[in-house]
Amino acid sequence: MKLVKSLIATAATLVVSGAAWADITIGVILPLTGPASGLGIPVNNQVKLWPTSIGGEKLKVIVLDDGTDPTTGIKDAKRFVTEDKVDVIVGSVATPVAIPVSGVAAEAETVQLSLSPIELPAGKDGWTFRLPQSNTVMAHAMVGHMKKLGIKTVGFLGYTDAYGESWLRDFTPEAEKNGIKVIAAERFARADTSVTAQALKLVAANPDAMLIVASGSGAAMPHKAIVERDFKGKIYQTHAAASRDLMRVGGKDVEGAYVVSGPAVVAEQLPDSHPSKKVALTYVAQYEKAYGPGSRNQFAAHGYDAFSVLEKAVPIALKKAKPGTKEFRAALRDALEGMGRTVVAHGVLNWTKDDHWGYTPETGVMLKVVNGDWKVE
Amino acid sequence: MDSTIFSILLLDGITNGAVYALLGLATVLVFSVTRVIFIPQGEFVAYGALTLAIFQTGQVPGTVWLLLIMALLPPAIISLVSLWAAPQNLPLLVQAGLTVAIVTSFGPLVYRLAYQSLADASSLVLLIVSVGVHFAMTGLGLLFFGAEGFRNPSFWDMRVNLGGLAIKGQAIIIFMVSLALIVLLWQFFARTLYGKALQATAVNRLGARLMGISTIGAGQATFAMAALIGALSGLLIGPTTTVFYDSGFLIGLKGFVAAVMGGLQSYPLAAVGAIFVGLVEAFGSFWASAFKEVIVFTLVLPILLWRSMADGHAEEH
C-alpha cells in the first residue's frame, strides 16, 4: 500500500514538473505594500486580467510582494531565477526596487520588463527593457509646453528618492536647451505632514512655473501647499501623478494643473490619427469593466503593455527554443530587440539592441485638470 | 529670510509641534504606567484620520469590522452604530465622534491582545512586541484604507490675516485641543483618585497592587487614553495634510523624540520638546529640505547623551 502511494506521489510529481517544464513562467515583482503600494496594486489588478496562454503555451504567473524594499525585491528576484526558473521577470513598478532587480536579471541572463523608468549605467541594461516612458521623453513634452506658454524659470519640488532625483537630472538639461532655468529645488517625502517651508522658499524665488515630482495622491499635498502660498504661476505634475487620486485629494486646488502623461489614461480624447488610440481604448475598456469606471491609470497600463510585448515576442522566441531554458531566455531578448515598431497603449515602442527605452520623443501627452477631469492640451 | 517667512515657519512649526506634543504625552503616559515603549502610537493617528475619511465617502471603514471581530460588548455596540451610521451621511462632527469612539476602543484591545500577559516582562521584550504591533497595525491599515491617501474636510474653514501671516481655523483648533488635552491630563493626574492610582502603578507596580489597584485595569485605561489621544491627533492633522495608511509611523516617531526629551517621564518637558521638534522640522525643511528627517532624528543623539550623563545610573527594576 505504502509503495503504491509513493509511486502515485512520484508519478504526480513527474506530471506536475513535466507540465511546468513546458509552461512559460512569468515572475512578477510588485510593491503590494509599503510607500509605493499605490502603484503596485493597480498593476497587480492588471496582472489578474492577463490571458492564460501565449502562442499556445500555458502561462504560469507568480506575483511576489517587494514591500517597496530593495532588499526584498532582490530576494524575490533571486527566488525567481533560482527556484522558479522564470523565463521573464516583470517589475518592479517602484524605482528603488527595479534598479537592483535589474542586476539579478542580468546576472541570471533573464529578461526584465521594468515597469519603472529606471536609469542604469551604460552597459548594465543588456537584459532590462523599460515599459514606462523615460523621464527625458516626458520632460520633452513638458518643456515643449512650457516654451509655448513662454515660461522662463521653474521651481522644483520633488520626492527625496530616485524618482525625484532622476526627474531633476533629466529635466534640467532639456529645459536649458530651450532657455528655461531651474532656479530653486526643494525636496519632501510622501509621509511629511507639512511642506509649508519648502513651498515658502520656492514661492519666494518667484519662478514662472512650479514642477512637482510626486506620485498618486502624494502629489496633491505639495500642490495645495504651493497654491496656499498664493503662487500665481503654472504648476506642472509628472506622469506618476496622472491618476484620479490627484483630483480626489487635491479638490479645487489642483484645478488648472498641467500633468504630463502617457496616452493610455486619456484614450477617448486622443485624435483618431494617434497610433495608440485603439490599443489604449481596449485597455481602458477591459480594465474599467473589471474595476469600475474611472479606475484606469498609468501603471496598470504598463502592466497591459508588458503583456502586449510578450505576446509579440514570445512566439518568435518559441521557434528557437523551449521555455525554461537558457536558450529561450536569450531568444526572448533577441525577439524583444528585433520585433520592430510595436504599438502599445502608452505609445509606440521600438526597442533595438542599443535602445531599451524605445519610445519616440513625441509620446508624452500634456493634460490639464479642468472641472476635476483630464483635458488633453 | 524676512519676518513674514519667519513667522509663517514659526506658525507651521508650532502647529505640527502641537500634534507631536499630544503624541509625546501619550508615549510618556503609556511608558510610565506600563513600561511599554509604544511605537504604534502613530498608527492610531492614521486610523483616526482615515476612518473619518472613509465615513466621509459613505462607506463602512474596515476598522469597524476589526472592532466587531476583536471585541465583545461595549465596543461591539459602537461597531453596530457605525454600521448603521456609515451610509447615512451624518454631519462631520457626528462622524468625528464615532471615529474617536472606534479608534479609542482599539486601545484596551491592543493592550489585552499584545501586552497584558507580558505585563511583567522586561522593557526590551515589550519594545519588541511594540514593533510587532506596529507592523500588524500598518498592514491592517493598508487592508482597510487602501494604498492611496486621503485628506479630510476642514472642521473650521476660516482664515485670519495678521499682516502677511494667514492663520487657518484648523491651526487654531489644533492649538486649542492640544492645550485643553494637556491641561486635562495634568489635572487628571494631579486631582483625581483614578489618576493618582495610575501614577501609583507607574511608580511601583507591586506596591500599587498591594494597595488594591488593578494593574491590568490601569494598563487598559492607559491604552484607551493613548488611543483617544491618537485618534484626536488624527482628526486634527487630517485636514492639513494627506494621510496615508503608513503616515502615522513618522508622526508617532517624532512624538517619541519629544517624549525622549522629556526622559519618558516628564509631561511638560515632552511638550516643550515636541514644539522644539516641530520648529526644527519647519526651519530644517526651509534651509535644507533634502536633509529634514536627518536633522530631526539626529536631535535624539545629543539628548540621549545628555540624558544618560545626567542620570548616570543603569536601568533599575
Image (cartoon, coloured by chain):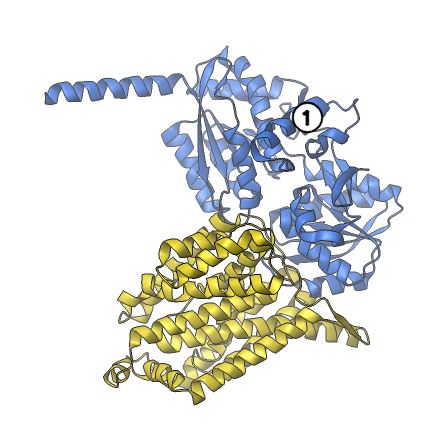
Chain colours: A blue, B yellow
Q: Is residue A258 above or below residue A342?
A: below
Horizontal side of B42 relative to A19 (left or right) equals right
Q: Is residue B237 above or below residue A82?
A: below
Q: Residue furthest top?
A: A319
Of the 4 image quadrants, the one containing the C terminus of chain B is bottom left
Location of residue A79 by image quarter? top left
Q: Residue furthest bottom?
A: B191
Q: Amino acid at mark 1?
A: Leu
Horizontal side of A114 relative to A205 (left or right) equals left
Q: Tell me the chain of label 1.
A: A
Residue B149 image point, x, y percent: 59, 52
Residue B310 image point, x, y percent: 43, 85
Kindly identify the residue that appears in the image at 43 percent across and 85 percent down. Answer: B189
Q: Is residue A76 above or below residue A163?
A: above
Of the 4 image quadrants, the one containing the N terminus of chain B is bottom right
Q: Nearer the viewer, residue A17 or A231?
A: A231
The residue tagged 1 is: A281
Asked whether the viewer can see residue A165, the reply is no
Crowding at label 1, few (<14), some or many (≥20) Cα neighbours within 10 Å?
Answer: some
Residue A325 image point, x, y percent: 42, 19
Horizontal side of A269 relative to A95 (left or right) equals right
- For mark 1, give the secondary structure: helix
Kindly identify the residue that appears in the image at 62 percent across and 77 percent down. Answer: B176
Q: Nearer the viewer, residue A373 or B126?
A: A373
Residue B84 image point, x, y percent: 50, 54
